[in-house]
Amino acid sequence: MMRLPLHDARRDVRDIVVPLITIVALLVVWELAIRSGLVPNFLLPSPTQVAASLVEDAPLLFDHAISTFGEALLGLALGVSVGFVVAVIMDRFELVALALNPLLTVSQTIPTVAVAPLLVLWFGYGMLPKVLLVALTTFFPIAISLVGGFRSVDPDLIDLMRTMRANEWQIFWRVKLPTAAEEFFSGLRISATYAIVGAVIAEWLGGFTGLGVYMTRVRKSFGYDRMFASIVVISACSCLLMYAVNLLERLCLPWRRAERK
Amino acid sequence: MMLPDDAGGRPALEACGLTLSWDGGMHVVAEGIDLDVHGGEVVCLVGRSGCGKTTILHALAGLTRPVRGRVLLHGEDVTGQPGRVSYMLQKDLLLPNLRVLDNASLPLVLGGMPRAEARQRADGLFARFGLEGTQELWPSQLSGGMRQRAAFLRTYLMGNEVALLDEPFSALDAITRQELRTWYVGMSRELGIASLVITHDVDEAVSLASRVLVLAGSPAEGKPSAIVGEVRIERPGVDDFSITHAYVDIKREVMGLLGAEVAR
């Protein structure tokens, strides 16, 4: 049965309204809990206090957010590039895949907070250690998702391409890459969320700008409302990056929309 | 197993004494396979599931090398050379990320033709293949029958005079299957394509082919398959061949060669 456009429009409105009501309800309960004294205000600021700090510190937060966002983007670009190259090599050479698989797994068992101080020690308080930490955390989901995507290609499709006299490059470009694209974007979504968090963690351990630096400063002055304001900004940055990834996916995989219909 | 001289000279495709194996020669699947297909002719290779039909087709397509024997294309040895004959696998295998027109013209693009020219050439054949109006759709927007037609067009645009088809109608409903079979026989005759179709469906083989080759054996039990017989099909000039006595007799003969119990 054909779905009516009106039905689609109602569903779209419902998809926005329901989560919005949930968030507003949560904020109201939180506000009431503080105002009624159920939770002491010195432990937890109210949403209105957080909002006031957000407005008051907006120019400062914006500058720090730009710095964090820049580090996250650069690190993500580096992580994605290295992850892509490693995945292609692992797919092309089975021996390399065998050699690298355990190393990749072990690399992910090392906690980010343990590596961050080392990077600061080696590369100083500038941008480089932050970018490297983000690259380290974002590389793995990309490499793993791409290797999985390349391996999921139907062998019959490769045979068909061979009967059309396709060379290795044509098989990669026309079959393997598009097949792996969907899994790549799943990995990229995970990496995008890691990117902002990774940059903030690196900033906690030393630096001059960034939301992590701002958080360290306001924590020392017990400015919990400002701490929460920075958390809101970090969350907004992550959402923005996720939205960008979704947009990129829609642009790069136009056939997926037709499949969903 | 050659056609009589009046059937049209040298075969387009010949298999001479092919012996094929799995596991690098450890497990013989089929041996002594001799067959030939002439231009414009549809030949069906019929056999039970698992008897090695697809393995034979893979070798004829040049995707695997036989342990023994040769594959000849108009007399030229093309053993182990992919790309010399067109191959349509069981699934339509349309690339989901390419529009139907780009899927159909893919063999031309892979062969080095500029995309615009390849699209133009493929576009000119869309009406003939019953695909008019689907050029800019994604494969997921097509019905099973239309997807199969697009796969046929892509196979045709591989530009070879021989087409190998691995159960090309198996995923379709009964009516679409019947329509496509009739359409394919007419089209391949018109274009002079030599077609070798493999199937385990005896009805399909008898409806489609001018000759049916019967493959029997059980490679999984250590008995390599071989071609045990050939049945020629002379079609009477009736609307529906499948309800004639001749059809039933031919079907019985093929079933008998396959080793099935046939009710009289």
Image: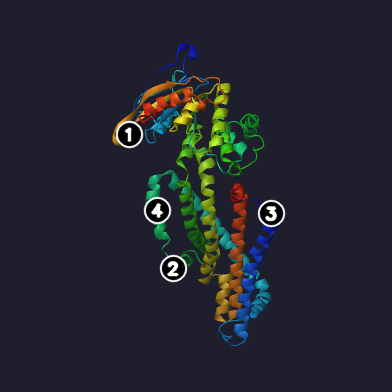
Foreground pick, B221 / B82:
B221
Q: Secondary structure at mark 4?
A: helix
Mark nearer the viewer, 4 or 2: 4
The percent position of residue A126, horizontal first and vertical second, equals 54, 65
Which residue matches tag 4? Answer: A101
Which residue matches tag 3? Answer: A4
Tell me the amino acid under the disc marked 4. Asn
Tell me the amino acid under the disc marked 3. Leu
Which residue matches tag 2? Answer: A114
Q: Secondary structure at mark 1?
A: helix
Q: Are marks 4 and 1 on the same chain?
A: no
Classify A237 as above or below A247. below
C-alpha gap between disc 2 and disc 3: 55 Å
Which residue matches tag 1? Answer: B219
Query: Circles 4 and 1: CB distance less than 8 Å?
Result: no
The chain ID associated with circle 4 is A
Mark with earlier residue (2, 3): 3
Mark nearer the viewer, 3 or 1: 3
Q: Are marks 2 and 3 on the same chain?
A: yes
- Tell me, for residue B51, which label it has, or none: none
Task: Name the residue rendered at 55%, 75% in the picture.
Answer: A216
Mark nearer the viewer, 2 or 3: 3
Query: Circles 3 and 1: CB distance less than 8 Å?
Result: no
The chain ID associated with circle 1 is B
Q: Residues within 10 Å of mark 2 (few under 14, many from 20)?
A: few
Q: Which image quarter holds the C terminus of chain B?
A: top left
The chain ID associated with circle 3 is A
C-alpha gap between disc 4 and disc 2: 22 Å
Tell me the amino acid under the disc marked 2. Ala
List the single residue furthest toward the top: B6
